[in-house]
Every structure is written in structure tokens, then in C-alpha cells.
């Protein structure tokens, strides 16, 4: 674990006490630092690691960030590897390949040549992995390590029922056990439905993810039981809340038919990183920058996503979606 405090107070003091000088240089000598963001995930077929370089210059930082050379290393100069160790012994070294990310969203940073590193090698849940970054041109090195989160297990079910036939809302409870090295857990309910237009044979299958607030384990040893209760009425009000995003087109007919539970977990390094970067209501916006990267910045951790089976919605739940007080204007019909 490592915290770094970047502060503007030092700069302000320098400006104050050097007011007698007409030239103030607040740009320090450049020090190479990699900015790393990556997770190893045994539930994913491909592992992706983002490795950029911190940049420094005179001018508009937003404009500099849009220049590919400001943030990207030249892949030909880089050696980026994963070392796999088991019981303290080196099992193998995995060389990561580079590729270009397509379809990046508009934002501050350059979309051109958005380079990312990857491997198709399977991840062993019983190993420790060390990410090693080497700039062969400058000799700069950075590294970080992580243990691997295993798949989660939780109680299965035969269907999803959010309301009884007599009209009383019911709650659905989900329980699962934490895994070693896991600290933060997030439950998602995926709602499946299909759309079609009268007279047109094609049917479009769609889904909506309803994400709940993350839950934290009290420790990372694993074996703790976490629980989430989904209140029936909240399910129907959620569907109502996303009307403009998903159900605005009133020329189509919709049929609701099933749901799925998805639980994602990540390690303690990510939990600290996330919490420190959360929006603050304080007027004092200076925050510590957390990183677990040695001689660099960013976060390298493990995560896992476990998906339950896809189970039907109960008949009473489907009826309520079609004609209930919250959802009767969403265009759903009975199967």
C-alpha cells in the first residue's frame, strides 16, 4: 500500500514568497512514471492492462492529453510481463502483447492509438501475479502484484417473484459467501425482455442491469456471508425510472420473461482506490492519491464476476409489469 499527497499549497507558498521575482518556474524536472490500471479476472477470457505515461508540459493539460504521444508509450520500447508464482516459486513469465482499443468514448484523453496490453493466458486462482513494466529505452521500471479472487458461490433459485398473486409485494433475498482477498462486492439484477413490432417477424432481445450499492466485507479472509434483500416494489419503480432510456418508443410491444443475478467482487486495493476517489462534499478537495504500483501510479488488483442462471419471472410478476401502477405505460403485454 502506498499513499502520495499532491498538493497545490506548496506551489501557492512559492508564489507568495517569491513575489519579488518576475520569473516563477513551477514546472519541475520531468520524472518518468507509468500510470497503470488493470485487473486480473479468472472469469474473463482475456486480461487487459492499461499502461500510460504521466506527462508534464507548459500549456493546456487538456490539449496535451489529446496528443497520443503525451500519454502512450511506444510499444516497441516496452517489455510488459506478468510473473506467476506459486508457493514462492516462479511458474512462468507471460509477455503481454499490445493492441489498439476501438470505439473509445469521447473524453479528455486521446482516442487515437489508444494502446492497451493483453494476454490470453488463463489465470490460476492459486497463484500470485506480479506485473512488471520496463521501458527498454530509458531503463525505467515499475511493478505491482496481486493475489487472485476465486469464483463466488451463492444460493440458486427457480424463479424471481416480486409480487404475490394477491397483489402484495414480496422481497427476494440473495446470500453469498465472500472469497479470500475479496473486499468489495456488488450485486446486479439483469432484467430480460424482448421487443417486436406488429406485422414484423423479427424479435429483438434486450436486457437492463439494475446495480445495487456495493457491500464491504469486514475482512479479506473469505468465508463470510453477505446478504442483499431486493424489495418487490423497488423492482417496479426501477423499471419506471428507466422509461425514457429504454421504453420511450411506444410503437413496439414488449414481453418480460426472465432475470439473472450477477455478483462482482474486487480486492482491497481497488476498494481503497475507489473510496478515495469518490465525490466529496467537503470544500477542501485535496485528496491523497492511492496506488499499489511501486515506482508508478495507478491500481493493479484482481476481480471476478459470477453469474447465476437465468430464471423466469413469476406469472404474478409478469402480470404486474403489464398492468401495475408503476409500469402499465411501458408497453409490456402478456406472453
Image: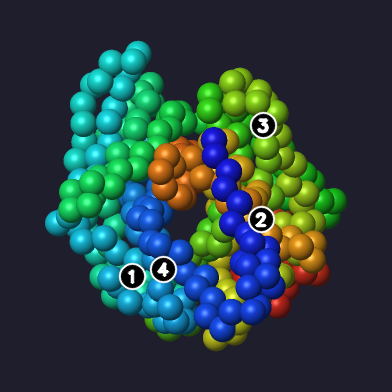
List the residue tagged with mark 2: 287
* Residue corresponding to mark 4: 56
Label whose residue precedes the other's in the sequence (4 or 1): 4
Q: Residue at x 85, y 51 (%)?
A: 168
Q: CA gap, disc 3 to disc 4?
A: 39 Å
What is the spatial separation of the Cα atoms under label 3 and label 1, in whole angstroms?
39 Å
Q: Quadrant of the C terminus?
A: bottom right
Q: Are marks 2 and 3 in contact (CB under 8 Å)?
A: no
Q: Alpha carbon of mark 4 to alpha carbon of mark 1: how far? A: 8 Å
Choose between 14 and 151: the one closer to the eye. 14
Which residue in the protein does label 1 denote? 70
Q: Nearer the viewer, mark 4 or mark 1?
A: 4
Q: Residue at x 52, y 80 (%)?
A: 23
How far across and down, in percent of the image, does residue 87 sit?
A: 35, 13
Residue lying farthest to the front in this orientation = 20
Q: Who comes first in sequence, dot 3 or dot 1? A: 1
**Residues under numbered marks 4 and 2 in contact, where contact means CB atoms less than 8 Å apart:** no
Would you say 197 lies left or right of 49 here? right
Local secondary structure at mark 4 = loop
Amino acid at each position: 500500500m502506498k499513499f502520495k499527497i499532491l498538493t497545490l499549497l506548496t506551489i501557492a507558498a512559492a508564489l507568495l514568497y517569491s513575489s519579488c521575482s518576475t520569473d516563477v518556474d513551477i514546472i519541475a524536472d520531468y520524472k518518468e512514471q507509468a500510470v497503470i490500471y488493470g485487473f486480473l479476472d479468472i472469469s474473463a477470457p482475456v486480461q487487459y492492462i492499461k499502461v500510460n505515461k504521466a506527462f508534464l508540459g507548459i500549456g493546456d493539460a487538456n490539449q496535451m492529453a489529446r496528443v497520443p504521444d503525451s500519454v502512450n508509450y511506444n510499444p516497441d520500447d516496452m517489455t510488459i510481463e506478468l510473473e506467476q508464482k506459486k508457493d514462492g516459486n516462479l511458474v512462468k513469465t507471460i509477455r503481454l502483447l499490445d493492441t489498439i482499443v476501438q470505439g473509445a468514448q469521447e473524453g479528455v484523453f486521446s482516442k487515437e492509438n489508444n494502446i492497451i496490453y493483453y494476454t490470453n493466458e488463463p489465470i490460476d486462482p492459486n497463484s500470485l501475479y506480479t506485473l512488471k513494466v520496463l521501458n527498454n529505452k530509458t531503463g525505467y521500471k515499475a511493478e505491482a502484484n496481486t493475489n487472485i479472487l476465486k469464483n463466488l458461490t451463492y444460493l440458486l433459485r427457480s424463479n424471481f417473484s416480486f409480487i404475490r398473486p394477491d397483489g402484495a409485494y414480496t422481497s427476494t433475498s440473495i446470500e453469498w459467501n465472500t472469497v479470500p482477498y475479496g473486499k468489495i462486492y456488488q450485486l446486479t439484477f439483469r432484467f430480460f425482455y424482448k421487443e417486436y413490432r406488429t406485422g414484423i417477424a423479427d424479435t429483438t432481445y434486450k436486457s437492463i442491469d439494475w446495480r445495487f450499492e456495493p457491500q464491504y466485507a469486514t475482512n479479506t479472509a473469505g468465508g463470510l456471508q453477505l446478504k442483499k434483500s431486493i424489495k418487490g416494489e423497488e423492482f417496479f419503480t426501477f423499471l419506471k425510472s428507466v422509461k425514457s432510456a429504454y421504453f420511450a418508443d411506444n410503437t413496439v410491444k414488449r414481453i418480460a420473461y426472465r432475470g439473472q443475478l450477477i455478483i462482482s467482487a474486487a480486492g482491497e486495493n481497488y476498494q481503497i482506490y475507489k473510496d478515495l476517489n469518490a465525490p466529496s462534499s467537503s470544500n477542501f478537495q485535496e485528496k491523497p492519491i492511492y496506488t499499489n504500483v511501486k515506482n508508478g501510479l495507478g491500481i493493479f488488483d484482481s476481480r471476478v464476476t459470477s453469474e447465476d442462471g437465468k430464471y423466469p419471472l413469476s406469472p404474478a410478476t409478469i402480470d404486474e409489469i403489464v398492468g401495475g401502477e408503476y409500469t402499465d405505460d411501458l408497453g409490456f403485454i402478456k406472453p
